[in-house]
Each structure stands twice: as structure tokens, then as C-alpha cells.
Amino acid sequence: MSISASIGRRHRGSRRGMKRSTRETLFFYVCISPWIIGFVVFTAVPMFSSLYLSFTDWDSFQKPNWVGLGNYAKALTADPLFWKVLRNTFYYAIVSVPVSLLIALYLSNLLSHDFRGKRIYRTIIYLPSLVPLVAAGLIFKWLLKPEDGPVNALLGLFGIKGPAWLLDANWVIPAIILLSIWQVGGGTILLISAINGVPKELYEAAEIDGAGHYRLFWSITFPMITPILFFNLVTGIIGAFQVFDQVYILTQGGPDNASQMMVPYIYTSAFKDFHMGYASALAWILFVIIMVISAAVLKSSDAWVFYESEVKK
Amino acid sequence: MNTRSDFGGKARRYAILTVVSAILCAPLVFVVSIALSSDATTKAMKFTFLPGEWHWENFIQVFSSGLPIGRFILNSLIIVIPACIFMTFSSALVAYGFARLHAPGKNILFILVLSTMMIPGQVLMIPQFILFRTLGWINTLLPMIVPNLFANAYNVFLMRQFITRIPTELDEAAEIDGLGYFRIFTRIILPMMVPVLAAVCVFTFSSNWGSFFGPLLYINDEDKMPLALGLQVLSSQSSSVQTPPWNMIMVGALILILPVLIVYYFAQRYLYESGMFAGSAGIK
């Protein structure tokens, strides 16, 4: 702390007749009060209520009855739809996240070089990721029409008979994955700025040593951007497990629950069937799954994520 | 890098990027094509992939067609405008507290802020619904407006990181001049936070402008729906006798898309300066 600052503090402290630290503490709590109010009302209290509700059988109108672990037991042992929904959600997350990430990595590598028209390509690739999901859903519903949709018309040009997409139990999840891949631009932009942040000297040194494009990518770019790849992987998985808008707009979970996923299922249980207790238990199961997967990815990261600070040590 | 072998690589890069851009652009071209189609084309459902007709008047007709799209837009604005203003400034104030002031309990509270970022909204949604139902807010826009008035954890984190990069000498000089904490915040810190204020404002705008889940949960009447929900409802009202007015719905979809694109276009400089893209590297 500089001398002038401490003089200033003493001066002001005596003027108002209140100790500086008390005033500072008071003002700190005034500052953060918007967060505290929001946290208590919209996060902390709802979180505990939801945990309580998950142990009850409640239709949201009568008094809730305590059923202990009944809801959890029902989900894990007596509700075949739960396992189907869980399998669908895993399928969606495990395919869409790595595929999107690989495409984003490939595109960002192409786009990080300097060349004429770079900005236009970047803009076009980024555009779809800014389209609100509702609009994207409406668009894809059109594109994927089985009979006269443009996607199947295009496939027809190559002599391929396209599937019924949203109406076909085997193709409905790939169709939802296509929508997530369409919005690959957001991740691509993050990776471009990560690649541009890699010190240029590293490349120059390697080029003098005669390293080719592939070598430069795998020996320098890839290890240097693994922290951001990793960040995208974790946030991508968390986001994929919480998918709602796309499913609701494209299929409402159909056909025959073939594309029903965790959050739309929680929504249906709570607000269509009014099984609030069961839906709360489902939400907590989802929460635990997300935490476990994030922790597993975090743990495995030691093996493959390279942090620059490790070198500096 | 201008060697002969590089030329092949360049041509291939252009080829790949052109194909990828074309594929990614195609859905948007199709939307524009439907939005510019005449009512007759819409009734017959004979849309072409590339725009074949240019009925720009659709963009005016959408407000006089009897569809409540103008009302949807107004409802979206009623949600978004207070959210942008209050979210940005309340988050800035909270971030200032965490970045600059010392108080007992601060570190524990900041850890609490960070950990709330991991709680999925689904865990909170049922009790929140009950809360708003008890308050009599069902079928009003309040459940979409009120939670956005209070600072959210992600924005606080982003802004705090930004403030810690502002030199403390400025605050100290202002303190010698006799400024209190609040005036240091409004006169010194806030003007320097413009990039991150703009970034948070843009996020708040784009996430609320297109938001679907909240309105789906709370709104029943068509004249209270924001644009995203309204369009979805209009588009799913198809029956055997009447097809939805797809050209008008796609005009609506473009009205949903365009403000987000425009806002991002004009704010991109601020988004980079706010450290949002570099910030993710900081989470290790």
C-alpha cells in the first residue's frame, strides 16, 4: 500500500467519525446486496425446497406427502421411460459435443491463418450460432421435412433416399445433433482466439527446424490450446445434458419418446402430469450426473491438458 | 510462407471453407426465401430454396396481418430492456464490491458466487414456479423480468476479473481527493468498465430476446407471449383445413434473428476487450 493512500484513509476515517474498516465492510455488503437477494430468493431457497420436494409425492395443489427415497427408487427401478430418456440424453451429449468440438478445431485451424477473405468466412461460420434456438428449431423443422424438405431433396440428387428424420425413431436424435453442429461457430471463434494467443516465436523456431503443417499443429497448436478445448468440452457436456428448446420445438420428445431427453422429461412430469415430487427427484439426478461427469473430465484432464504454467515452474 | 507447396494448401483451404460456409448459410437463405414468398405460394406450400419472389412488403404486412406479431415484439422488449439495464448495473456494483473492497466473509461469499454457476436451472425451476404462482405472477411477464434485475454469478465473475485489471492507483488518487466508495465506483471504475458493461448487456439481450423456456412455463395468453414463444405457438397451430402462415412466421423468425446479429456486429470490439474470449483460458 502506498503512503499517500494510507494518509488519505486516515484523513477520511477521522472526518466521518467511523472506522474505515467498518465503513468499508458496510459498503461491501451494500454493493453485493443485489446478488445476495437474488441468490437467497431465486437460488438458495428454491434449491432446498426442491431437495425437500424430491422426497415427497406432490401434485402442487394438495399437501406434500413424505415418501423418502421413493421417487429416486421409482426412477431407477420402476420407470422404464427414465432409462430410455437417460440413454437418449447420453447419446445426444456423447456424439454432439465431441463431433462439434472436432469440427470447431478443424475450422479454427483453417481460419486462424492470415488470408484474403478471412473475416467473411469467420462471420459466416459464426452467424448460425447467434440464431436463437427457437428460430433455429423452426428452420430445421422445415429443412428436415421427409417428403419435400431441402435436405432430402439434396440427398436425392446423389441418389440417396433420405430418412424421415424427425419422424423416424432411429434418425431423430441425429437430426437434433445436426442442429447443434450447425451452431459450431461459437466454439470455433473461441478456438481461433486461443490459437491466435499462441506465441509466434514457437512457430518460427519450429519452422527453422523444418517442421511441416501437421507437425506444427500437433506439436505446438494443439498442446497450447488444450486448456480452452477442455473448457469447451466441459461446458459443452453440461449444456448438452440440459438440452430443451431444440427437443421441444422439433419433436416434443417423439416419435414414441425416441428423442425424449432429461429436461423435457422433467418439464413434462412437473407441468403436464403435475408429478412435482418425481420431477424434482429427476432434476437432482440430472444435477448429480452433470457433477459426476464434470468431475471425471476434470480428473482426466491432468493426463492430456497442457498448462503453460507447468513449464514456467 | 509463400512457397509453391503452400499454394495447393491455400486452394484447398478456400475450397473447404467455401463449402462449409455454403452449408452453414443455406438454412438462413431458405428462411429468407420463405419470408419473401407471397401468400399464394405459402398456401400451396411451394417454396423454392433460393428466393424466387421478392415480397418485401411482408415485412410491413406482418404488423397488419391480424397475427399478433407486433404484440409479441413489444412483449419481448418489455422483458429485455429492464433486464439489460438492471442486470448490467447490478452486476457491476457487485463485481466492484468483490474486486475492490475488503470485508470479513468476502472470500466465502465469492466461492458461493462461483459455485452457483454450476447449479442447473432445472433444479430450481419447480420451486421458482411455485413461488411465482403464490405471488400471482402466472400469465404475466414478471417471472421473466424480476429475476433478471439481480446480478447473476457469471456476469459478476466476468466483471470482477475485468476490474482487477484496472490499476488501483486510480482509486487511491480519488480517495485522497475525498471521494467515497460509491463515487469512486461511479466516476472512476464504471467509466473504465465500458467494454465489459457492453459485453454483459449484449449477453443479457441475446439470452432474453430469444428465451423460450420461461415464457413456455408462465404464459398462457397469446397476447402476453414474447416473440420466441409466440412464433412457436403460431407454427404449431396447423390443422387439416389451415396451414400456418409460414411466410409471416419466417418474417417473425428473421425479426427474432436480426437484432441479435446486429447487436453482436456492433459490440464485437467490446466483446474482445472485455476478455470474454481470453477469459475462458483463465479457468484452469
Image: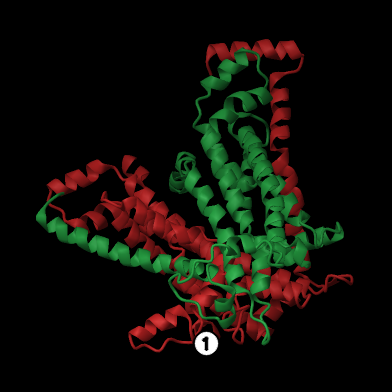
- Nearer to us in this view, A52 or B155: B155
Residue A69: x %, y % from top left: 74, 74
Q: Circle 1 marks a residue in which chain?
A: A
Residue A93 appears in view: yes
- What residue is pinned by disc 1? A168
- Please identify the quarter of the rendering in which residue A68 is found: bottom right
- Residue beneath the point at 69% across and 85% down: A78
- Nearer to us in this view, A153 or B130: A153
User: Quick check: A281 left or right of A133?
Assistant: right
Colour in which chain B is drawn:
green
Type of the residue with mark 1: Asp
Mark 1 is surrounded, within 10 Å at the Cα level, by few (under 14), some (14 to 19) or many (20 or more) other residues, namely some
- Please identify the quarter of the rendering in which residue A108 is found: bottom left
In the displayed structure, A290 sits above or below B165; it is: below
Residue B183: x %, y % from top left: 66, 23
In the displayed structure, B262 sits above or below B71; it is: above
* Label 1: which secondary element: loop
Residue B212 appears in view: no
